[in-house]
């Protein structure tokens, strides 16, 4: 009976300590995305809402990000990394995302937005394979502001008829017009912010 009581006390203490801990709002949720050969969409397929005007995440590409379509026009199609919809609309109407492409033997990163259904792109920089980089999009009243590794790189004007509201998350997607030529892996750590 004494051993049972000791076990009960230990389990009760452990249970109380676990339920008393609140998750850190800055906690990272690590996800391993896979875009299968011949596909556009990544798995896991997620539907999530962002309740913030700020998206912060880390991402790492490996050698699977390298590809060659043999045509510069096809090679320059942007693949999507992460972002959010905006203005209570679909993402092809209003959204802000980071995009990437393998071009000239390097991994290029872009700001990629739709503003009132018009697509806009700005070159941000290049990143190395197998290195984690920090990405951030901040929605201000007038702009989508893009940061990489803590530095503000570019901003794209938001739609002038935009009403704030629900922002749904946009996850890795291959294309452009062509699907992934082979399996592509991207590791993403999303920072949940308020």
Image (tube, helix red, strand yellow):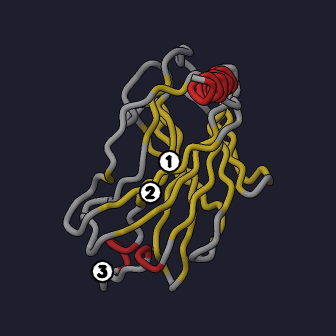
Image quarter hosting the C terminus: top right
Q: Can you tell which quarter of the image residue 157 is in? A: top right
Residue 142 in sight from this viewpoint? no
Q: Nearer the viewer, residue 160 or 145?
A: 145
- The residue at 51%/85% (across/down) is 105
Residue 41 or residue 115, whichever sits in front:
41
Looking at the picture, does residue 159 appear above or below residue 122? Answer: above
Would you place residue 158 above or below residue 147 in this image?
above
Q: Is residue 3 above or below residue 153?
A: above
User: Observer-nearest residue: 162 or 5?
Assistant: 5
Please report whichever mark, 1 or 3, sits nearer to the chain's N-terminal start: 3
| Position above or below: 168 against 32 | above
Which residue is painted at 65% across and 51% down in the image?
Answer: 135
Circle 3 residue = 69
Q: Could you tell me residue 112's position as x and y percent?
A: 51, 49
Q: Residue 14, position in %: x, y?
A: 65, 29
What residue is pinned by disc 1? 82
- The residue under label 2 is 32
């Amino acid at each position: 009976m004494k051993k049972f009581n000791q076990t009960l006390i230990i389990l009760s203490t452990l249970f109380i300590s676990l339920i008393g801990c609140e998750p850190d709002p800055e906690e990272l949720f690590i996800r391993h995305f896979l875009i299968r050969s011949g596909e556009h969409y990544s798995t896991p397929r997620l539907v999530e809402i962002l309740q913030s005007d700020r998206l912060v995440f880390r991402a790492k590409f490996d050698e699977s990000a390298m590809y060659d379509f043999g045509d510069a026009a096809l090679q320059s199609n942007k693949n999507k990394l992460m972002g959010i919809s905006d203005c209570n609309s679909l993402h092809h109407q209003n959204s802000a995302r980071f995009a990437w492409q393998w071009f000239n033997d390097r991994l290029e990163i872009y700001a990629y937005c739709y503003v009132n259904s018009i697509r806009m792109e700005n070159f941000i920089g290049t990143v190395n394979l197998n290195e984690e980089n920090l990405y951030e999009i901040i929605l201000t009243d007038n702009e989508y502001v893009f940061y990489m590794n803590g530095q503000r790189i570019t901003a794209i004007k938001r739609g002038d008829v935009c009403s704030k509201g629900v922002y749904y998350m946009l996850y890795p997607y291959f294309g452009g017009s062509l699907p992934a030529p082979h399996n592509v892996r991207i590791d993403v750590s999303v920072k949940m912010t308020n």
